[in-house]
Amino acid sequence: MISAIRIALTPAAADEINCPASRIVVMTSGHDVSRAKVCAPAVWARAFFERCGIIQRRKLTLEIVNWVTHPLGVPVIATFDATRWRARISNFEATLALILPKSVYRKLPFRDVYDSLVVHEVAHAIFREHVGGRRLPVTAHEYVAYAIQIASMPQETRDLLLSSFPLQTSKDLARFNDIYLAMRPLRFAANAYRHLFRNERYCETIARIASGDAEFPLPLE
Ligand SMILES: [Zn+2]
Protein backbone atom coordinates (compact mmCIF):
# COMPACT_ATOMS: atom_id res chain seq x y z
CA MET A 1 0.00 0.00 0.00
CA ILE A 2 2.79 2.40 0.90
CA SER A 3 4.62 1.71 -2.32
CA ALA A 4 1.39 2.27 -4.25
CA ILE A 5 1.08 5.74 -2.69
CA ARG A 6 4.71 6.48 -3.40
CA ILE A 7 4.27 5.46 -7.02
CA ALA A 8 1.14 7.57 -7.30
CA LEU A 9 3.15 10.58 -6.13
CA THR A 10 5.99 9.97 -8.57
CA PRO A 11 5.93 12.76 -11.13
CA ALA A 12 4.89 11.72 -14.60
CA ALA A 13 8.05 13.30 -15.95
CA ALA A 14 10.95 11.10 -16.90
CA ASP A 15 12.87 9.68 -14.00
CA GLU A 16 16.59 9.11 -14.09
CA ILE A 17 19.46 7.49 -12.26
CA ASN A 18 23.21 7.79 -12.57
CA CYS A 19 24.93 4.50 -13.22
CA PRO A 20 27.82 3.95 -10.77
CA ALA A 21 31.39 4.78 -11.75
CA SER A 22 30.45 6.16 -15.13
CA ARG A 23 29.07 9.20 -16.89
CA ILE A 24 26.00 7.30 -17.96
CA VAL A 25 22.48 8.34 -17.00
CA VAL A 26 19.49 6.06 -17.53
CA MET A 27 16.11 7.71 -17.98
CA THR A 28 12.75 6.04 -17.96
CA SER A 29 9.21 7.30 -17.96
CA GLY A 30 7.64 7.55 -14.51
CA HIS A 31 8.37 4.73 -12.11
CA ASP A 32 9.65 2.12 -14.56
CA VAL A 33 11.96 0.02 -12.39
CA SER A 34 13.86 -1.45 -15.34
CA ARG A 35 16.33 1.43 -15.44
CA ALA A 36 18.55 -0.01 -12.72
CA LYS A 37 18.99 -3.19 -14.77
CA VAL A 38 20.23 -1.15 -17.72
CA CYS A 39 23.18 0.18 -15.73
CA ALA A 40 24.94 -3.20 -15.47
CA PRO A 41 25.48 -3.72 -19.23
CA ALA A 42 26.12 0.02 -19.74
CA VAL A 43 28.85 0.06 -17.09
CA TRP A 44 30.28 -3.18 -18.51
CA ALA A 45 30.70 -1.52 -21.92
CA ARG A 46 32.34 1.53 -20.37
CA ALA A 47 34.75 -0.66 -18.38
CA PHE A 48 35.65 -2.63 -21.50
CA PHE A 49 36.83 0.54 -23.28
CA GLU A 50 38.57 1.76 -20.16
CA ARG A 51 40.71 -1.39 -20.11
CA CYS A 52 41.75 -0.44 -23.64
CA GLY A 53 42.68 3.07 -22.49
CA ILE A 54 39.60 4.64 -24.06
CA ILE A 55 37.90 6.72 -21.38
CA GLN A 56 34.33 7.91 -21.66
CA ARG A 57 34.22 11.61 -20.76
CA ARG A 58 31.11 12.85 -22.48
CA LYS A 59 27.95 12.29 -20.46
CA LEU A 60 25.76 9.73 -22.19
CA THR A 61 22.03 9.46 -21.63
CA LEU A 62 20.18 6.21 -22.23
CA GLU A 63 16.47 6.75 -22.49
CA ILE A 64 14.44 3.58 -22.14
CA VAL A 65 11.09 4.00 -23.84
CA ASN A 66 8.08 1.89 -24.72
CA TRP A 67 8.65 2.23 -28.42
CA VAL A 68 11.46 3.76 -30.45
CA THR A 69 10.49 5.05 -33.86
CA HIS A 70 13.08 5.57 -36.55
CA PRO A 71 12.92 8.93 -38.41
CA LEU A 72 11.50 6.93 -41.33
CA GLY A 73 8.58 5.90 -39.14
CA VAL A 74 9.32 2.23 -38.47
CA PRO A 75 9.71 0.89 -34.93
CA VAL A 76 13.31 -0.01 -34.13
CA ILE A 77 15.28 -1.28 -31.14
CA ALA A 78 17.34 1.89 -30.72
CA THR A 79 18.31 5.24 -32.21
CA PHE A 80 21.12 7.64 -31.35
CA ASP A 81 20.85 11.42 -31.16
CA ALA A 82 24.39 12.76 -31.61
CA THR A 83 23.34 16.32 -30.80
CA ARG A 84 22.11 15.45 -27.33
CA TRP A 85 24.42 12.43 -26.98
CA ARG A 86 21.44 10.33 -26.11
CA ALA A 87 20.51 6.78 -27.12
CA ARG A 88 16.83 5.90 -27.05
CA ILE A 89 16.37 2.18 -26.49
CA SER A 90 13.11 0.22 -26.62
CA ASN A 91 12.29 -1.40 -23.31
CA PHE A 92 12.61 -5.13 -22.72
CA GLU A 93 9.06 -6.04 -23.80
CA ALA A 94 9.06 -3.86 -26.92
CA THR A 95 12.44 -5.24 -27.97
CA LEU A 96 11.22 -8.78 -27.50
CA ALA A 97 8.28 -7.98 -29.76
CA LEU A 98 10.60 -6.52 -32.43
CA ILE A 99 12.83 -9.59 -32.75
CA LEU A 100 11.75 -11.63 -35.78
CA PRO A 101 10.56 -15.20 -35.10
CA LYS A 102 13.41 -16.71 -37.17
CA SER A 103 16.15 -14.60 -35.58
CA VAL A 104 18.92 -16.47 -33.79
CA TYR A 105 18.26 -14.11 -30.87
CA ARG A 106 15.11 -16.17 -30.23
CA LYS A 107 17.26 -19.21 -29.38
CA LEU A 108 19.07 -17.30 -26.61
CA PRO A 109 17.99 -16.25 -23.09
CA PHE A 110 16.31 -12.95 -23.84
CA ARG A 111 17.69 -11.07 -20.85
CA ASP A 112 21.19 -11.80 -22.20
CA VAL A 113 20.15 -10.55 -25.64
CA TYR A 114 18.65 -7.36 -24.23
CA ASP A 115 21.67 -6.60 -22.05
CA SER A 116 23.93 -7.15 -25.04
CA LEU A 117 21.86 -4.70 -27.10
CA VAL A 118 22.42 -2.07 -24.40
CA VAL A 119 26.16 -2.83 -24.60
CA HIS A 120 25.97 -2.36 -28.39
CA GLU A 121 24.48 1.14 -28.04
CA VAL A 122 26.88 2.24 -25.33
CA ALA A 123 29.80 0.84 -27.34
CA HIS A 124 28.68 2.92 -30.33
CA ALA A 125 28.58 6.09 -28.22
CA ILE A 126 31.96 5.62 -26.52
CA PHE A 127 33.63 4.58 -29.78
CA ARG A 128 32.10 7.61 -31.57
CA GLU A 129 33.38 9.88 -28.81
CA HIS A 130 36.87 8.43 -29.27
CA VAL A 131 36.74 8.64 -33.07
CA GLY A 132 35.76 12.31 -32.85
CA GLY A 133 35.42 14.07 -36.19
CA ARG A 134 37.13 11.35 -38.21
CA ARG A 135 34.82 9.79 -40.78
CA LEU A 136 34.80 6.01 -40.76
CA PRO A 137 32.62 3.62 -42.79
CA VAL A 138 29.42 2.55 -41.02
CA THR A 139 30.74 -1.01 -41.15
CA ALA A 140 33.73 0.00 -38.99
CA HIS A 141 31.39 1.35 -36.31
CA GLU A 142 29.16 -1.73 -36.49
CA TYR A 143 32.11 -4.12 -36.41
CA VAL A 144 33.28 -2.62 -33.10
CA ALA A 145 29.80 -2.37 -31.53
CA TYR A 146 28.80 -5.90 -32.54
CA ALA A 147 32.09 -7.51 -31.50
CA ILE A 148 31.88 -5.93 -28.04
CA GLN A 149 28.18 -6.78 -27.80
CA ILE A 150 28.90 -10.47 -28.41
CA ALA A 151 31.87 -10.36 -26.00
CA SER A 152 29.55 -9.12 -23.25
CA MET A 153 27.29 -12.18 -23.42
CA PRO A 154 27.67 -14.97 -20.85
CA GLN A 155 29.84 -17.72 -22.33
CA GLU A 156 27.01 -20.24 -22.85
CA THR A 157 24.85 -17.69 -24.62
CA ARG A 158 27.72 -16.54 -26.80
CA ASP A 159 28.64 -20.14 -27.71
CA LEU A 160 25.05 -20.78 -28.73
CA LEU A 161 25.03 -17.70 -30.93
CA LEU A 162 28.40 -18.52 -32.53
CA SER A 163 27.39 -22.13 -33.19
CA SER A 164 24.49 -20.78 -35.26
CA PHE A 165 27.02 -19.15 -37.60
CA PRO A 166 29.75 -21.74 -38.00
CA LEU A 167 31.20 -20.27 -41.18
CA GLN A 168 34.03 -17.92 -40.24
CA THR A 169 35.08 -14.81 -42.06
CA SER A 170 38.60 -14.65 -43.48
CA LYS A 171 41.38 -12.89 -41.61
CA ASP A 172 41.21 -9.53 -43.35
CA LEU A 173 38.56 -6.89 -42.87
CA ALA A 174 37.64 -6.66 -46.55
CA ARG A 175 34.62 -8.91 -46.20
CA PHE A 176 32.96 -6.72 -43.57
CA ASN A 177 31.12 -4.67 -46.15
CA ASP A 178 27.76 -2.91 -46.36
CA ILE A 179 25.96 -5.79 -48.05
CA TYR A 180 27.12 -8.34 -45.49
CA LEU A 181 25.97 -6.02 -42.71
CA ALA A 182 22.58 -5.32 -44.31
CA MET A 183 21.79 -8.88 -45.36
CA ARG A 184 23.17 -10.91 -42.46
CA PRO A 185 23.66 -8.60 -39.47
CA LEU A 186 23.99 -11.34 -36.87
CA ARG A 187 26.41 -13.34 -39.01
CA PHE A 188 28.36 -10.09 -39.41
CA ALA A 189 28.21 -9.72 -35.61
CA ALA A 190 29.41 -13.26 -34.89
CA ASN A 191 32.32 -12.89 -37.28
CA ALA A 192 33.21 -9.40 -36.07
CA TYR A 193 33.54 -10.95 -32.59
CA ARG A 194 35.71 -13.81 -33.90
CA HIS A 195 37.84 -11.41 -35.90
CA LEU A 196 38.39 -8.78 -33.20
CA PHE A 197 39.12 -11.31 -30.47
CA ARG A 198 41.25 -13.63 -32.64
CA ASN A 199 44.23 -12.58 -30.51
CA GLU A 200 45.04 -10.63 -27.36
CA ARG A 201 45.73 -7.44 -29.27
CA TYR A 202 42.10 -6.38 -29.65
CA CYS A 203 42.73 -3.03 -27.95
CA GLU A 204 45.33 -2.24 -30.61
CA THR A 205 42.91 -3.32 -33.31
CA ILE A 206 40.21 -1.01 -31.93
CA ALA A 207 42.71 1.87 -31.77
CA ARG A 208 43.74 1.20 -35.37
CA ILE A 209 40.11 1.17 -36.53
CA ALA A 210 39.40 4.41 -34.62
CA SER A 211 42.38 6.12 -36.24
CA GLY A 212 41.11 5.20 -39.70
CA ASP A 213 44.08 2.93 -40.44
CA ALA A 214 42.14 -0.35 -40.61
CA GLU A 215 41.11 -1.29 -44.12
CA PHE A 216 37.37 -1.54 -44.11
CA PRO A 217 35.82 -1.60 -47.56
CA LEU A 218 34.41 1.74 -48.58
CA PRO A 219 30.62 1.98 -48.87
CA LEU A 220 29.32 0.62 -52.14
CA GLU A 221 27.76 3.22 -54.41
ZN1 LIG B 1 24.89 -0.62 -34.36
Image (spheres, rainbow, N blue to C red):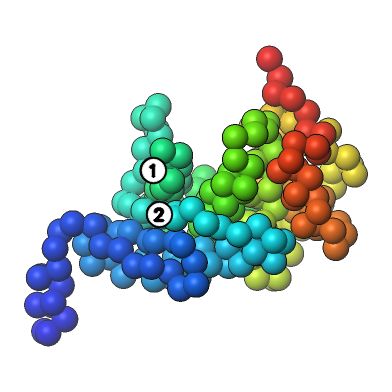
Is residue 130 something one can see in this rendering?
Answer: yes
Q: Quadrant of the N terminus?
A: bottom left
Quarter placement of the C terminus: top right
Above or below residue 206? Residue 174 is above
Mark 1 surroundings within 10 Å by alpha-carbon count, few (fewer than 14), some (14 through 19), many (20 or more):
few
Q: Quadrant of the rendered structure where residue 30 is?
A: bottom left
Relative height, residue 191 to residue 44 (above, below): above
Image point 25% across, 62% down: which residue?
15
Amino acid marked by disc 1:
Arg
Residue 80 in the image: state x and y as whole percent: 45, 42
Side (left or right) of 121 relative to 70: right
Residue 218, given in percent of the width and then of the height, sits at 74, 25
- Taking the spot 81% from the left edge, 38% from the top edge, the residue there is 214
Which of 204 and 66 lies nearest the eye of the viewer?
Answer: 204
**Cβ–Cβ under 8 Å for marks 2 and 1:** yes
Quarter-of-image position of residue 135: top right
Q: Which residue is mark 2?
A: 61
- Secondary element type, mark 1: loop
Is 61 displayed left or right of 126 in the figure?
Answer: left
Disc 2 residue lies near ligand 1 with CB under 8 A? no
Which secondary structure lies at badge 2?
strand
For the residue marked with disc 2, what is the amino acid? Thr
Q: Characterize the local packing of mark 2: few (<14), some (14-19) or many (20 or more) Cα atoms within 10 angstroms.
A: many
The residue beneath circle 1 is: 84
In which quarter of the view is residue 162 placed? bottom right
Q: Looking at the image, which is closer to me, 220 or 104?
A: 220
